[in-house]
Amino acid sequence: MTKVSLGLPLAAAAAGTVATLFAPAKRLHIVCGTAWALFSLAHAWQYRKKLADDLGVASAGVCLKQKAMQKIGAGLRRLQLPPTKLGALIGSMRPAAYTPGRIRLYSRSLVENEQLAEQILTYFADYAEVDAVECNTLTGSVLITYEPEFFAENEELSQIEKYVKECVQTAQGRS
């Protein structure tokens, strides 16, 4: 379909539809409304590529949800966790709160799971930089307290602290 200017016919059909809204002859209103709908569809078909670009849908058929997930994934890849067991453990939890010296994480897997809580406590016992770890199996919460100066001396723990801080700030809209 060649691009024919549909501005004037669209405006005329819209005006006719509105003008005949309260007219006693409803057939004229129906005809104007149908013409308006048809011209609108033809106009949308002519500019379908521009509409797709404006809506953020690629012409290859990638849906909006996939594009959003790609952007989120790219953002998370910027936040690096160390490739260690501790990094994987922290990455499996949702950082909820951060202040220097305190980190709070949540995990649904921890709810009513005493065995996992014991594993987490045992794992953190290997880190002298960590003062205390509290696991709450009722809420799925893990509270880690530490001295920030000692944490900064350990590269792995420093990366984890930075990751948690950025995640919490992003979730609070303060990135």
Image (cartoon, rainbow, N blue to C red):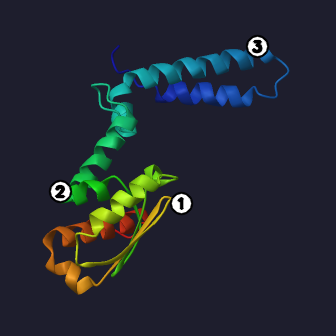
Q: Point out residue 73 in the picture as x, y percentages from the top left corner.
A: 28, 47
Q: Quadrant of residue 21?
A: top right
Badge 3 marks a residue whose secondary structure is helix
Badge 2 marks a residue whose secondary structure is loop
Q: Which mark is residue 84?
A: 2
Q: Point out residue 122 in the picture as x, y percentages from the top left corner.
A: 31, 64
Q: Which mark is residue 27?
A: 3
Q: Point out residue 155 in the picture as x, y percentages from the top left corner.
A: 14, 71
> Which amino acid does the dot numbered 3 rest on?
Arg
Question: Quick check: 126 left or right of 48?
Answer: left
Say which residue appears at 47% left-offset and 30% top-offset: 7
Rounded to the nearest angstrom, the CA distance separating label 3 from label 1 is 65 Å
Q: Quadrant of residue 49?
A: top left
Say which quadrant the C terminus sits in: bottom left
List the residue tagged with mark 1: 139
Badge 1 marks a residue whose secondary structure is loop
Task: Rate crowding at label 1 as few (under 14), some (14 to 19) or many (20 or more) other CA atoms within 10 Å.
Answer: few
Sequence order check: which comes first, mark 2 or mark 3?
3
